[in-house]
Image (cartoon, coloured by chain):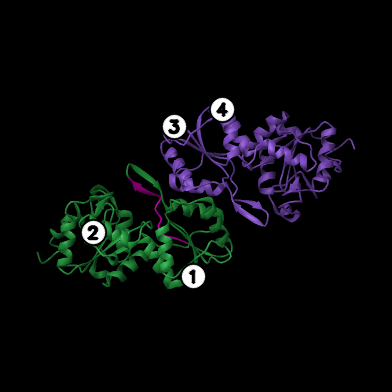
Chain colours: A purple, B green
């Protein structure tokens, strides 16, 4: 094989909602059988890595939690390096809060004690949390966020995502969020490469969005493959200043493409 | 008297929290006895005009609800002209929702029916409301707001105000709020002048903030008096491009200033 590591976007690349992209299971099994290592990326901080691994396994792609990198995991790992055991307050849902607690952080709602405020995609966001975060940031707490997404696609439409929480906090604190760790941040790429244990030069990033996935891969000096099973089209790719190394109809084509899979 | 109508800011001008600025009661009684008409402005959409009149009366300034203009009243009146009886959804507290209902608007949480989304200072703001507002604006509902304030002063500090709600909605809808009716908007000045029934040329605006109160008075072609009992100082006034017509130590000085009260 031309590459040893494969970094996959999930929605639009591996599955669409609850439906596997046809051939995704066979393609990934083939890469793994040939010695390739894979990691799956998601910007959603709503579930743990375990939950994503279960979903992929249920859909036919046998996956371990160690092969999943989502934005809550990236945030937990990022903070564990910068401020292990710090007192944090997350505008997030229960699984994320549990993940932080398991990683040794102290969760607090006391603005005098909080050192890090973490904005996340949070369907339990409310005025009380907004005020705690505001008071903490006013007293000097750091202000970071899991993912920059404006909305999250759901059955039949979309719902407000992390960008709404970030914007509310920026407006009231008059401070800009210091870092957003999810795609297209270099932070999530660093964690993905650490998890793979393979240098960027030997990895391929596969995603369906030119402006986020392909941009992020290029900024990490990594080869990129655009799949046309999601948001971006061939016409969009032709017009973009960001040229992926490969354009494939879908993930299934990875094992048919001789440039990617040279021993076939 | 040089003026027939007097438009007063409240917090910092007439009272500070629960405490009357010394001499405010006597000054306002004197203006009224001499035939002056007064109106009190507030950006807070949390209470009805009745509640503000009660508070002022309790503090020693006998006030009728008709002499109060706050941002929920301005919004109700603004929409009553533009879209009487419209289906609205307000991110606001109970007294504001009741005020809208009394004014003949239909309150709805159904994004398919909502024609106007009203962002307000709302200590009951939550994700559910954010999502309803987002879905309605996405389907073409108008997006308006009561007041632009970032925070609201409270005992011992400040809490998030309407700006946080506006920012969250702007971020998720990618649409800018169409109008904000509270200070320093010309809309609240128009309503104040209507309530007074006196032309702007014969009115004096009295407030403690150069950047909002004095700016708004000048834009309405009205004489302005800055009182130094609140936020802005004489030094700030000296440096500002906005020059008030009068600078007074406090509201009490109105009845001592011969230019304002010529018959003394």
> Which quadrant of the view contains residue A155?
bottom right
Q: CA distance from mark 4 to mark 1?
A: 52 Å
Marks 3 and 1: same chain?
Answer: no
- The span picked out in magenta is B144-154
> Is circle 2 on the same chain as circle 3?
no
In what element is the residue under mark 1? loop
Q: Which residue is mark 3?
A: A113
Task: Give the position of the N terminus of chain A as an image quadrant.
Answer: top right
Would you place residue B209 above or below residue B192 in this image?
above
Report crowding for label 1: few under 14, some 14 to 19, many 20 or more residues within 10 A (C-alpha).
some
Q: Are marks 2 and 4 in contact (CB under 8 Å)?
A: no
Can you give x and y, in whole percent of width and height, for residue B181 in the image? 40, 62
The residue to which callout 4 is attached is A104
The disc at residue B86 is 1
Magenta stretch containing residue A209, yes or no? no
| Subunit ID for the residue under disc 1 | B
Mark-to-mark CA distance, 4 and 3 = 16 Å
Q: Is residue B146 magenta?
A: yes
Q: Mark 2: give few (<14), some (14-19) or many (20+) Cα within 10 Å.
A: some
Check whether the beta carbons of the residues at disc 2 and disc 3 lie within 8 A of each other. no
Q: Quadrant of the C terminus of chain A?
A: top right
Q: Residue B161's x, y, as percent?
A: 41, 51
């Amino acid at each position: 094989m031309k590459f040893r590591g494969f970094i996959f976007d999930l929605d639009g690349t591996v599955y669409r909602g609850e439906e596997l992209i046809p051939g995704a299971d066979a393609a990934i099994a083939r890469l793994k059988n040939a010695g390739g290592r894979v990691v799956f990326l998601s910007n959603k901080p709503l579930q743990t890595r375990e939950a994503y691994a279960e979903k992929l396994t249920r859909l036919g792609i046998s996956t371990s939690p160690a092969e999943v990198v989502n934005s809550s995991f990236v945030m937990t790992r990022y903070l564990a390096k910068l401020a292990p055991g710090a007192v944090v307050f997350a505008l997030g849902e229960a699984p994320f809060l549990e993940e932080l607690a398991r990683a040794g952080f102290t969760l607090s709602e006391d603005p005098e004690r909080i050192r890090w405020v973490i904005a996340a995609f949070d369907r339990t966001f409310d005025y009380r949390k907004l005020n705690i975060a505001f008071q903490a940031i006013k007293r000097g707490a750091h202000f970071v966020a899991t993912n920059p997404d404006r909305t999250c696609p759901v059955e039949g439409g979309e719902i407000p995502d992390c960008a709404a929480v970030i914007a509310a906090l920026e407006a009231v604190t008059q401070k800009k969020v210091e870092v957003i760790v999810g795609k297209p941040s270099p932070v999530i790429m660093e964690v993905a490469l650490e998890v793979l244990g393979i240098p960027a030069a030997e990895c391929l990033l596969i995603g369906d969005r030119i402006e986020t996935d392909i941009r992020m891969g290029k900024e990490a000096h990594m080869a990129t493959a655009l799949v046309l099973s999601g948001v971006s089209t061939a016409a969009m790719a032709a017009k973009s200043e960001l040229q992926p190394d490969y354009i494939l109809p879908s993930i299934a084509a990875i094992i048919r493409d001789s440039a990617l899979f040279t021993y076939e």
